[in-house]
Amino acid sequence: MRLDGKCAIVTGAASGFGAGIARKFVAEGARVVLADMNLEGAQALAEELGNRAVAVQVNVALNDDVETMTARALEAFGRIDILVNNAGITHLPAPMEEVSEDDFDRVLAVNAKSVYLTARHIVPLMKAQGSGAILNVASTAAVSPRPRLSWYNASKGWMTTATKGMAVELAPHGVRVNAINPVAGETPLLKSFMGEDTPEVRAKFLATIPLGRFSTPEDMGNAACFLCSDEASMVTGVCMEVDGGRCI
């Protein structure tokens, strides 16, 4: 019960890595707000997890939605100890100059602006209570970019730099900020990363991962649990690769 008594928000929690993180948090004693645009998926997970989970519909790129999400968390649990910025999207693989402006804006809004918006609303609460843990789910793309995903790579690089800047600024207030860098995993985004989901394309991706498999939601849940628990009380500003050795 490493998160016993903790109250958390996990964005993008209805599926994939977010669902894995939420399941692990509840198993370790936390109460969790499952924030996602897919309200039906978030509600289904909340039913699975029981009375320790609450589903909230939110577009993390919109200030009013993030404000509502924060208020709902406070209404449900009274405080916010952990924030996991997991919601993310990508553009389809393409030459950098051929990615549309709409796709570029959407990627930066969801992957970067959302971190700013959640900080606006939740950092003041953590400062006031003198404690908190923020975890940004970045990507190995921030460390070892793949071609034809240039603007996705850039958005995740932004997230790792933001993580370190946030960590330095918030440390005197008792708030820790870390990131995890997963490699591609069995999530709804996998097909978008690959462009097409075929055995040949999967084999090409797996060939770049020394441990020979994709990241799983359980992998992310385990790493997130450690970084957000008191066991990691001396860890801040770290961007941990959970990638089977891809970035070596």
Image (cartoon, grey):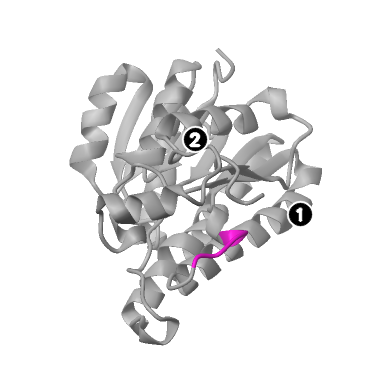
Q: Residues within 10 Å of mark 2 (few under 14, many from 20)?
A: many
Which residue is labeled 2 in the image?
220
Of labels 2 and 1, earlier in sequence is 1
143 part of magenta stretch: yes
Name the residue located 46 percent from the left edge and 38 percent from the top edge. Answer: 9
- Which type of secondary structure does the marked residue at label 1 adopt? helix
The image quadrant where one finds the N terminus is top right
Q: Closest to the observer: 120 or 48?
A: 48
Q: Closest to the observer: 127 or 22?
A: 22
Q: Please say if 205 is above or below 130.
A: below
- Which type of secondary structure does the marked residue at label 2 adopt? helix
Which residue is labeled 1 in the image?
169
Kindly check if marks 2 and 1 are in contact, taking CB atoms under 8 A apart as contact: no
Q: Which residues are magenta?
A: 142-146
Q: Nearer the viewer, mark 2 or mark 1?
A: 2
Q: Please say if 134 is above or below 189.
A: above
Residue 30 visible? The answer is yes
